[in-house]
């Protein structure tokens, strides 16, 4: 079987993605979820796993050092990399929203939006016909309206707990988000059989089967 390298995202998606691969009857590296190893091989499966920062997964796949990868749709929209998105895995479900303090109005002269997703946010406000200044942050986005950095934020909402605990409300939903299986365009052609098999086995898990 041809060897496939799969880029796995560290953090939230990792456990769910690993579980999906296990359900699809892939032998994942033993204790991969517990160790600090960033690269592991399962020879009998023809799979090499690399563990990357979630926003870097499309970079590894675009450059072909990973044939396939698992990434959130938010990251794919923000990164806009040359990769094929072949399967919606339906995991790490959340949505992207605009939020702010209840009743707060955008500054009429210089409305500001803080976000980890500057591309998604500027596309969204452009489509709405609204001119805003986008302020890029790397985390704790909910702080921005509380301390007056921006009136609104664009961020991920899952349970809504972070918004609630910081006194913010959802103002508009931009779109729903799930994790996707992505493929390098060259690997898609040259390793078509291995890519097709992985996609089909994961598709069965998405549909509620066990991958075999
Ligand atoms: N609260 C959440 N609930 C469910 N899924 C989420 C949540 N936050 C983020 N996600 C999804 O999980 C992905 C990875 O999120 P995670 O929090 O693990 O990494 P991150 O800290 O955003 O990554 P980075 O370190 O690259 O900034 C996101 O791209 C998104 O698709
Ligand atoms: O609706 P909830 O279930 O509360 O989840 C939403 C929160 O989760 C993510 O933050 P994360 O924990 O990744 O922290 P950071 O972005 O501030 O680093 C996201 O940026 C929200 O802040």
Image (cartoon, helix red, strand yellow):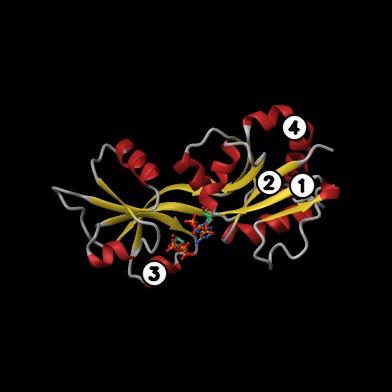
Residue at the image position 22 percent from the left and 60 percent from the top: 104
Residue on which the image places disc 2:
6
- 183 sits left or right of 78 in the view: right
Observer-nearest residue: 52 or 23?
Answer: 52
Residue drawn where x is 34% and y is 62% of the image: 169
Label 4 CB-ligand 1 distance < 8 A: no
* Residue 108 placement, left or right of 208: left
Quarter of the rendering containing residue 101: bottom left
Residue 191 shows which numbered tag? 4
Residue closest to the eye, 19 or 46: 46
Upstream in sequence: badge 2 or badge 3: 2
Q: CA gap, disc 2 to disc 4?
A: 13 Å
Looking at marks 2 and 1 on the same chain, the residue that comes earlier in the sequence is marked by 2
Residue located at (75% from left, 32% from top): 191
Q: Nearer the viewer, mark 3 or mark 1?
A: 1
User: Ligand 2: which quarter?
Assistant: bottom left
Residue neighbourhood size for the residue with mark 3, other residues' Cα within 10 Å, grouped as few (<14), some (14–19), many (≥20): few
Q: Residue 71: x, y in percent?
A: 57, 48
- Counting labels gives 4
Classify mark 2: residues with Cα within 10 Å, few (<14), some (14-19) or many (20+).
many
Where residue 164 is drawn, which disc sits there? Answer: 3
Residue 66, position as x, y percentages in the image: 65, 42
Separation of residues labelled 1 and 4 (CA atoms): 12 Å
> In the picture shown, does residue 187 fall above or below 174?
above
- Per the image, label 2 sits on a secondary structure element best described as strand
Q: Examine the image and state in which quarter residue 164 appears.
A: bottom left
Find residue 47 and name its label. Answer: 1
Measure the C-alpha gap from mark 2 to mark 3.
Answer: 37 Å
Q: Between tags 3 and 4, which lies in front?
A: 4
């Amino acid at each position: 079987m041809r060897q496939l390298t799969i880029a796995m995202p560290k953090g939230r998606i990792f456990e769910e993605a690993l579980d999906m691969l296990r359900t699809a009857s892939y032998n994942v590296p033993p204790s991969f979820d517990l160790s600090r190893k960033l690269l592991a091989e399962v020879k009998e499966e023809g799979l090499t796993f690399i563990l990357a920062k979630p926003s870097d997964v499309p970079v590894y796949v675009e450059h072909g050092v990973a044939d396939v990868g698992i990434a959130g749709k938010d990251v794919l929209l923000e990164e806009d990399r040359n990769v094929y998105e072949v399967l919606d895995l339906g995991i790490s479900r959340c949505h992207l929203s605009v939020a702010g303090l209840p009743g707060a109005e955008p500054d009429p002269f210089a409305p500001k939006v803080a976000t980890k997703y500057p591309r998604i946010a500027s596309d969204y406000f452009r489509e709405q016909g609204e001119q805003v200044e986008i302020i890029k942050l790397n985390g704790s986005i909910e702080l921005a309206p509380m301390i007056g950095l921006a009136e609104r934020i664009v961020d991920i909402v899952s349970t809504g707990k972070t918004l609630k605990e910081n006194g913010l409300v959802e103002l508009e939903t931009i779109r729903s988000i799930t994790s996707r299986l992505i493929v390098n365009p060259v690997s898609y052609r040259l390793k078509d059989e291995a890519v097709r098999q992985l996609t089909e086995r994961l598709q069965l898990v998405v549909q509620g089967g066990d991958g075999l």
